Amino acid sequence: MSDLELEGRRAHVTGAASGIGWAIAQRLAAGGARVAISDIDEAGAIARAAELGSGHLGVRANVRSMDEVTAALAATVDAFGGLDLLVNNAGIEIGVPVVETDEADFMRLMDINVTGVFRCTKAAAGALAEAAAAGSDAAIVNIASVAGVGGVPLLGAYCASKAAVIRFSEVCAIELREAGVRVNAVCPAFIDTPMVQRLAPAVAAMTGMEFGDVVAVKQGRYGTLEEVAEVVAFLGSSEAGWTTGSHYVLDGGLSGGLL
Ligand SMILES: NC(=O)c1ccc[n+]([C@@H]2O[C@H](COP(=O)([O-])OP(=O)(O)OC[C@H]3O[C@@H](n4cnc5c(N)ncnc54)[C@H](O)[C@@H]3O)[C@@H](O)[C@H]2O)c1
């Protein structure tokens, strides 16, 4: 764990009751940040915040609801006296070929993975700009995926959504630059989380390989939760002060290789 300047930063992480979001929340809190954990799983969010100790917040927010997102971000600002960092992490997967994907499932995924990022960004932008005006290095980090950089069979909806998050992050970076809010995206390959455990059987069936072998061949090994959380913490800290509009690929070389 590096020595980033996170002390006293006021952060909100969506979908943080599980997996990558929870690892990000832990990393930020370990650096001295106050962290609001939101999730559609309200009990999980509250329990995780309690695990972090006092001074943190657990709150329900379904990123499909503008009202819930607005309320959760307002509760964060109330509890912490402002907001310096938003991490848009909540997301879902579908592991089904495109022509077999149900239209309603496709739209649901886009509503969570893309419109959810839009909703939270819109709800947080004012508070982040206020923090920036008061001297904070305000930032948004969006969890995209290497699946937004290149195509992955079975992940048509997911790839489309994560490519959209990368481009959306670039636009937000430009639009919010004058307000002093940085916006970057992070693009991990497979990390061993409940999401990937759900996808593994379909990927193994499609490739005819054990899922662990697919991971070993394509990306060397699983990335760890800590490796993702560290990059997010860096982008969310003042050490990344001139970094905006970028996307950071963490994939063990997967997207750079032809063989
Ligand atoms: N695991 C990977 O290999 C991997 C790789 C690249 C990107 N990602 C991205 O990282 C993020 C986290 O994924 P994960 O692997 O930790 O998944 P996960 O399924 O373990 O956790 C996702 C969390 O999001 C919450 N969530 C789901 N729908 C929600 C909604 N509508 N509103 C609020 N919260 C909701 C879930 O309750 C859960 O706590 C996602 O955006 C995912 O696309 C994951």
Image: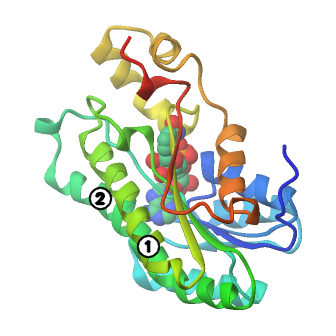
Residue 119 against residue 1 in the figure, above or below: below
In which image quadrant can residue 34 be found? bottom right
Which amino acid type corresponds to the residue marked 1 in the rendered image? Answer: Ile
Viewer-nearest residue: 241 or 120:
241
> What's the residue at 31%, 43% (across, down)?
159
> What's the residue at 65%, 57% (across, down)?
235
> What's the residue at 27%, 48% (across, down)?
160
Residue 155 appears in the picture as rendered: yes
Q: Going by the image, does 252 lie left or right of 29?
A: left
Q: Secondary structure at mark 1?
A: helix
For discs 1 and 2, the disc positioned in front in the rendered view = 1
Where residue 7 sits: x, y (%)? 87, 68
Q: Going by the image, does 137 lie left or right of 114?
A: right
Q: Where does label 2 land, which residue?
A: 110
Residue 18 appears in the picture as rendered: no
Residue 159 against residue 49 in the figure, above or below: above
